[in-house]
Amino acid sequence: NAGVTQTPKFQVLKTGQSMTLQCAQDMNHNSMYWYRQDPGMGLRLIYYSASEGTTDKGEVPNGYNVSRLNKREFSLRLESAAPSQTSVYFCASTASHSTDTQYFGPGTRLTVL
Amino acid sequence: KNQVEQSPQSLIILEGKNCTLQCNYTVSPFSNLRWYKQDTGRGPVSLTIMTFSENTKSNGRYTATLDADTKQSSLHITASQLSDSASYICVVSAYNNNDMRFGAGTRLTVKP
């Protein structure tokens, strides 16, 4: 099992460009999450999907959109990137949205110039 | 103000020594508290998960404690190893809340 995979690992964008971060899990998990991690701050939830077909906003959803393509895949889209979106993005999954162990991907380091 | 505060921000210890990391939270009503280890450049990895009824949980050399009355948790690392060098993150979930609140982490460096 690969666990949670993310692509790309690194990305540099210019202000105003768009891109999609991809996430996939092979653990048959129901719930998936997107976080961003900035220096000196805890991870902050952008969006989550408690189950296939549902998505909900987290703490910092502005400037992002998500798609739960199927049970395995959960993508994060930046329609018009801004320098404030420079961050490390992590995808995570859990079997169900309760006290189950949360598994994280390796992260995508995004720089917006 | 962050609902999860961790201390110290950073810590340096010698290999073989013990250490204790602290986590105070205001998240309410409480559901569960998790400790994660995050190596540089990698995603967090779960160490322990504790619910309201649990006041201690161990995972090898890692022991987490929880005092739900004072809203405090600690992570004790015994006989530290160089590979313990990482950030340790405390995460608290509220009951019936789909959001988990992350602390900023404690950066631990273990020196030989």
Image (spheres, rainbow, N blue to C red):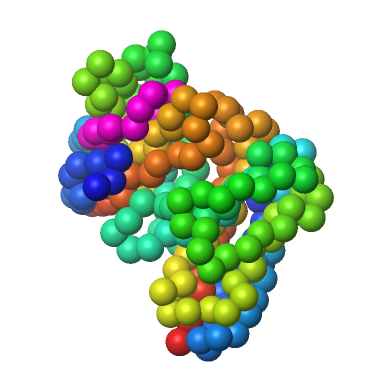
Q: Which quadrant of the structure image shows residue B22?
A: top left
Q: Is residue A48 left or right of residue B13?
A: right
In the image, A108 versus B80, the foreground residue is: A108
Q: Is residue A23 visible?
A: yes
Q: Is residue B63 left or right of residue A24?
A: left
Residue A84: percent from the left, percent from the top? 41, 74
Q: Is residue B4 left or right of residue A3?
A: left
> What span is colored magenta in the figure?
B22-34
User: What residue appears at the point 24 percent right and 33 percent down from the top-left corner?
Assistant: B24
Q: Residue furthest top?
A: B53
Q: Looking at the picture, does residue B40 appear above or below residue B32?
A: below
Residue A92: percent from the left, percent from the top? 59, 48
Q: Looking at the picture, does residue A60 appear above or below residue A109?
A: above
User: What residue appears at the point 51 percent right and 74 percent down from the top-left corner?
Assistant: A110
Q: Is residue B85 left or right of residue B59?
A: left
In the image, B53 versus B8, the foreground residue is: B53
Residue B80: percent from the left, percent from the top? 29, 38
Q: Looking at the picture, does residue A42 appear above or below residue B24?
A: below
Q: Is residue A29 visible?
A: no
In the image, B39 versus A66, the foreground residue is: A66
User: What residue appears at the point 71 percent right and 44 percent down from the top-left corner?
Assistant: A54
User: What residue appears at the point 72 percent right and 48 percent down from the top-left corner?
Assistant: A25
Q: Is residue B15 magenta?
A: no
Which secondary structure dominates the residues rendered in magenta? strand
Residue A106: percent from the left, percent from the top? 56, 58
